[in-house]
Image (tube, rainbow, N blue to C red):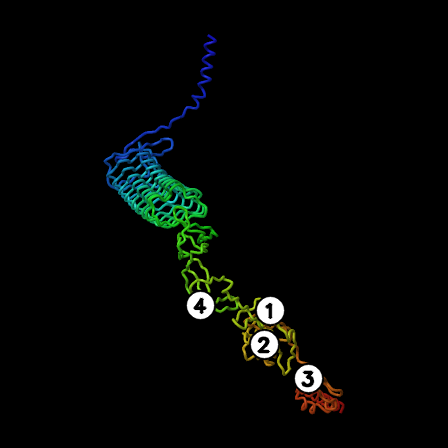
Amino acid sequence: MRKRFLGLLIVLAFALPFVTAAPCFADTGETMINQITYEYDTETNEAAVVSSELEISGDVAIPETIEVDGQKYKVTSIGTHAFQDCRKLTQITIPESVTSIGESAFEYCTGLTKVTIPEGVTSIGNAAFSNCISLSEVIIPEGVTSIGDFAFYDCAGLEEVTIPESVTFIGGAAFRGCSKLTQITIPNRVTSIESGTFYDCGSLSEVTIPEGVTSIRNYAFQGCSKLTQIIIPNSVISIGTHAFQNCVSLTNVYAKEGLSLGNAPFEGASQDIHIWRYEMLKSTDNATHVKIVSVEDQGGSSIPNSFDIQCSTMGNGYVIDEVEPDNLSLKHALIKTEETPATCENPGNKECWTCTVCGKYFKDEGGTEPISSEDIEIPATGHSYENGKCTVCGAIDPDFKAAITAGANGTWQKGTKDGLSFTSNAAFADFQKVSVDGKDLDASNYTVEEGSTIVTLQPSYLDTLSVGKHTLAIVSDTGTAETEFTVAAAEEQAVPEGQTAVKGQAVDNEVANGGDKELLAKTGDSSMLPIAALSILAVASIAVGVLALRRSRI
């Protein structure tokens, strides 16, 4: 019994990890709404479109949410084969809540003409829109990072597609058979052009491959019969088999020197194809600058013919700065630049011809004598300052300090006939005004003259000022010169010996002692009259008193 129990425990011990590791499946269900079947998850409250009836037709809008038994579920994905073979579907509206479109989701929707992919989508699955032959326009939003293999395979009506910069991967044969697609710009973050990506895009005449792509795989551009030129960026290190096979209009291929072009890359292409080997000189924000080092045929042999080649020939942000072979002559789009004289602050330039493409300068109209920017530049003359101002352009000298150079801290005494003068180092022509004690003076209260600026305050004005210190400012265009000055009281008159000062006047002592009337007459002072009257009245009173005393004795 104990052995059986022990054996059971051993079995349980071995089984327990598998039991605990067993997945716990969420409670899911399916529902059909308007001919579309959704699978919903009660734990995540999300739903996915899983299928639809083949007879669904016209314009169809997938809702952002669905409701099942009172519970709402957000629609977040369109599953594999969800609308496959719905040939009567003409337009589909995908809600913003959707983040992924599964494999073959709309494959063989041959009546679908337009689709707008919402911004929330980050990936487009393999063959998602394959064989949608009526689809003419696709807008792929910023945020999509991956376009799967065969995503738009054989969309023969597709004329325009915008691939955002967020895309990092474009799958093999993604646009194969898009026979009406005329131009394509590959995003900067894509590093590889996969096998057959643009196979049989018969109307494709312009392709921009960004710096950063490192490989172009087998058959990438096979059958692009309208493609006339291709620039293989400096970053490419490998090219696959038959990459440009049957590109019958291709005449110019630009590739860096030393790059292997792969096995029979131009089989079936034009016999007049020219392979221009370049060396990258520099890359700026505006352009990639290169030097052409050789011209070859598709067999790798040098072409000895003479060619005139424009610096703008490559286009697509490339500029040819130099050509090395003697049989090449580099031409420019030149415009004449007239001579411009230099100013105090800005340089001028000599007459020259400037290329509107590469920005180079030439001494002659034919562009045969290149010159540098230093050769054509006329240096700025610099300012000629005098008394704080440029005599040429009138600019103010930032280092000039207006100051009183003569008359500072002067003194003027009341009663003086002459005014008080001050000299500022500012130019006379730059004079503006005079202020005393912070108040602007009327021009009648001073004179001003040259040398540099000489201001003289009028004595009649000075006489109105109080005794003490005052401030003066001479204001000019080039600054304000300031100082102080003092107004002193009038000088008192000295009194000679033998005279007495009376009300500010000297009077002889003899005259002063010569009687009240004479003094009054000379001084004009009537202040003695009341005293004299009182004296007479006192004498009269005494006389009356004496007479009365005598009579009483009698």
User: Does 292 sit left or right of 531 as displayed?
Assistant: left
Q: Nearer the viewer, residue 515 or 7?
A: 7
Task: Give whichever of discs 1 and 3 has the lower sequence position.
Answer: 1
- Few, some or many C-alpha atoms within 10 Å of disc 4 (few <14, some 14-19, many ≥20)? few
Q: Secondary structure at mark 3?
A: loop
Circle 2: is it few (<14), some (14-19), or many (20+) Cα within 10 Å? many
The answer to whether residue 281 is above or below residue 343 is: above
Q: Position of residue 77 (x, y in %)?
A: 34, 36
Discs 1/3, front: 1
Position of 114 compared to 432: left or right?
Answer: left
Q: Nearer the viewer, residue 416 or 342?
A: 342
Residue linked to disc 4 = 338
Question: To which residue does mark 1 refer?
Answer: 401
Q: Give the spatial CA distance, label 2 vs label 3.
A: 42 Å
User: Marks 4 and 1, Cα distance to the nearest angstrom?
Assistant: 40 Å
Assign a secondary structure to mark 4: loop
How many angstroms separate mark 4 from mark 3 (CA)? Answer: 85 Å
| CA–CA distance in space, label 2 to label 1 | 14 Å
What kind of residue is marked 3?
A: Gly
Q: Is residue 7 above or below residue 215?
A: above
Q: Does residue 197 appear anywhere in the picture?
A: yes
Give the residue type that dot 4 points to: Glu
Q: Which residue is mark 3?
A: 504
Task: Please tell me whether mark 2 sits on a helix, a strand or a loop.
Answer: strand
Number of the front mark, 2 or 4: 4
The residue at which mark 2 appears reads as 453
* Residue 525 horizontal/vertical position (percent): 66, 87
First-in-chain label (2 vs 3): 2
What amino acid type is highlighted by mark number 1? Lys
Question: What separation in Å lies between label 1 and label 3 (alpha carbons)?
Answer: 49 Å
Q: Position of residue 384 (x, y in %)?
A: 56, 71
